[in-house]
Amino acid sequence: MASSKSKSSSYPLPLIFPPLQLPHKTTLIILHGRGSTASKFAEPLLTHPVSVSTSVSSEDTTPLPPQSFRSHFPNTKFVFPTASLRRAVAYNRSLTHQWFDCYSIFEPDVKPHLQIQGLRETTAFLHGLLRKEIEAVGRRNVVLMGLSQGCAAGLVAGMLWEGEGFAGFVGICGFLPFRGEMEGAANGEEGEGEDLFERESEVAEEGSGSGFERAIRWLRGELGTAGTKLDDEKNEHPFQTVPIFMGHGTEDEKVPCDLGKSAAGFLGSVGINVQWKEYEGLGHWYSEDMLRDVVHFIKNLEGWG
């Protein structure tokens, strides 16, 4: 593995775990949660024991001896980025590693502007990682995965992705920033307090397209990110071709399970293929049962490996 600090960016260079065996066929990009780092997050996940059935694609459920999460993907390169240091309003403006700042997970409508800069910068950073790995192994062999705030940042980056759809996305104990606002935009609802005169010239464009396209336009406008005009001839946005697995513990004390469920529900409502699963008694973390499902999900992705 290799890691070093970048002198030209606020994001440290990712922690890289090369494939256990060659050739390098696939890549997993995995994002840690708020307050963590790649060096803290990677080893516990990669070494966590996971027992799967004899075959992930058959009906044979005979359990095999547990092996590490990493060992289930011998030809996979693991990329663990570290979020930049940012002032956290919730922690009295202390510096912490976070993909974006936010006032409160439990009150997502309070001071939502705090999320904008971090989400904009992190999206650009993650898009660079995706492009690099897709160039190396092909788009159908790259999966993006995130825990907690890493899941949230990954979902936003995926929604704003303009390349061809990559293999899949895995979200653990996560949420979707601006979900309520995007849901309103998808349903053609105008936000409260908007200048209706200023919007008159934009109504035709914003009201056109699918609900997902309207949500994307709203998100781009909120984050102030440029994007090419969506192609009306295409039936699907790139992220609508990316299968998603989202797992959440029912006893999550940091990101309530309902936030994950509502995120999955919204994504499903705008044409994204989402698998949602709750884990009874699990808190804000993963378990062997969840990782077993993650292994099954990834190994069954089209073209994986």
Image (spheres, grey):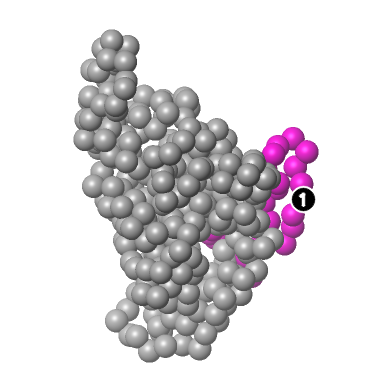
Residue 116 shows in the view: yes
Residue tagged by mark 1? 4
Residue 103, given in percent of the width and then of the height, sits at 50, 43
Name the residue nearer the viewer: 292 or 262: 262
Give the quadrant of residue 29: bottom right
Residue 122, given in percent of the width and then of the height, sits at 56, 40
Q: Is residue 76 above or below residue 266?
A: below
Q: Is residue 147 above or below residue 61?
A: above
Residue 24, given in percent of the width and then of the height, sits at 59, 61
Quadrant including the N terminus: bottom right
Residue 123 shows in the view: no
Q: Amino acid at mark 1?
A: Ser
Q: Is residue 47 magenta?
A: no
Q: Is residue 245 above or below residue 84?
A: below
Q: Provide the secondary structure element on which disc 1 rests.
A: loop
Residue that appears at 37% across and 72% down: 279
Q: Please report the bounds of the magenta region as a residue range.
A: 1-29
Q: Is residue 7 magenta?
A: yes
Q: Farthest front residue?
A: 92
